[in-house]
Image: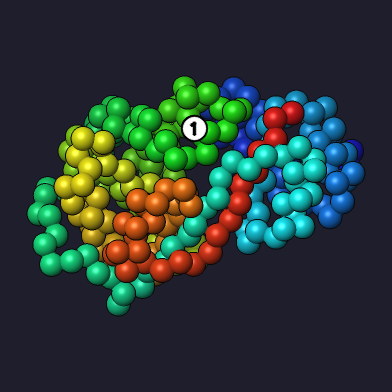
Amino acid sequence: MKNKIPIIELKWDTRLLKKKIGRLCMLPNHVKKIDTILDVARSKGYLYLTCRIDPPEFSQVRSLESAGFYLTDVGVTLEIKKQDLYLGENLLKVPINTATIKDIPILKKIIKSLFLHSRFYHDPFFTKDDADKIYQAWIEDAIKGISADKVFWVKNKGFVVCKKSHLKIGEISLIGVANKFRGKGIGRALLASSLEWFYSQGLNKVRVRTQLININSLKFYLSAGFKLCSCDMVFGKIL
């Protein structure tokens, strides 16, 4: 156990925030074993661990809580197949373009503090500056093709990040609309563009994950024809 622990270092997070962060990727069935893992993690310089349970099991939840982990997020994954898509009769006609490197500065401004339902804005380990930095780095990496395959955007108003998974399933990594432009149909237009692109790539199934507490987001996807697929729980532990 001292030589090998079931923790993967999240190197991207560690490098960005300059704090050693890891993921507990295999959960022992005994609290004492978790405590031993935590001691080894501390000795290796970890400052924070995250653990995602998918699907959630009450026994695992109790084990994590007994070891001092706290709930940071409840995620809901939704899925849509091409034949189930419904975007309504009056889809907003607005110029939607592929984001390029020259658009990064504007998109980094749009995304800042946009996803306030995210665990990064609620977990006490992360500061608001940390959370902003994470999302700004995500959108930059997505546009550069490091973490995504396509980013569509409506200039100065909103964007959607698209990724093709190894399972031949489309993934909407992020979709966001600036606060002052919400409720005007921009999100639905961006969703339509992303789904059209996925289908053009031969992917007939698309998934998106959102937070359970983000009721507006859930309503948005359900109204477009998405169906509930799975749920997960994410826990954190400050070491």
Which three-letter amino acid code belongs to the residue tagged 1?
Tyr
> Which image quadrant: the C terminus?
top right
Instruction: Tell me if residue 123 comes above or below residue 58 in the rendering.
Output: above
Q: Position of residue 54 (x, y in %)?
A: 62, 58
Q: Residue at x 45, y 27 (%)?
A: 133
Give 230 or 59, whichever is nearer the viewer.
Answer: 59
Count of numbered tags: 1
Give 15 or 130, whichever is nearer the viewer.
Answer: 130
At numbered mark 1, what does the secondary structure look like: helix, strand or loop?
Answer: helix
Q: Position of residue 131 (x, y in %)?
A: 48, 29
What is the image's colouring? rainbow
Please say whether residue 19 is visible from this viewpoint. yes
> Which image quadrant: the N terminus?
top right
Q: Residue at x 65, y 59 (%)?
A: 56
Task: Name the side, left or right, on which 115 lies relative to 233.
Answer: left
Q: Which residue is mark 1?
A: 121
Q: Residue at x 87, y 51 (%)?
A: 30
Count residues near mark 1 (Cα–Cα under 10 Å), then give few for <14, some for 14-19, many for 20+.
some
Task: Name the side, left or right, on which 208 lies relative to 125.
Answer: left
Q: Position of residue 124 (x, y in %)?
A: 59, 28
Please say whether residue 204 is visible from this viewpoint. no
Give 6 or 191, whichever is nearer the viewer.
Answer: 191
Q: Residue at x 46, y 66 (%)?
A: 228
Res 4 quadrant in image? top right
Q: Position of residue 47 (x, y in %)?
A: 70, 27
Instruction: Tell me if residue 56 comes above or below residue 25 in the rendering.
Output: below
Instruction: Tell me if residue 14 comes above or below residue 97 in the rendering.
Output: above
Q: In this view, which residue lies farthest toward the bottom?
A: 83
Task: Name the side, left or right, on which 128 lies relative to 47.
Answer: left
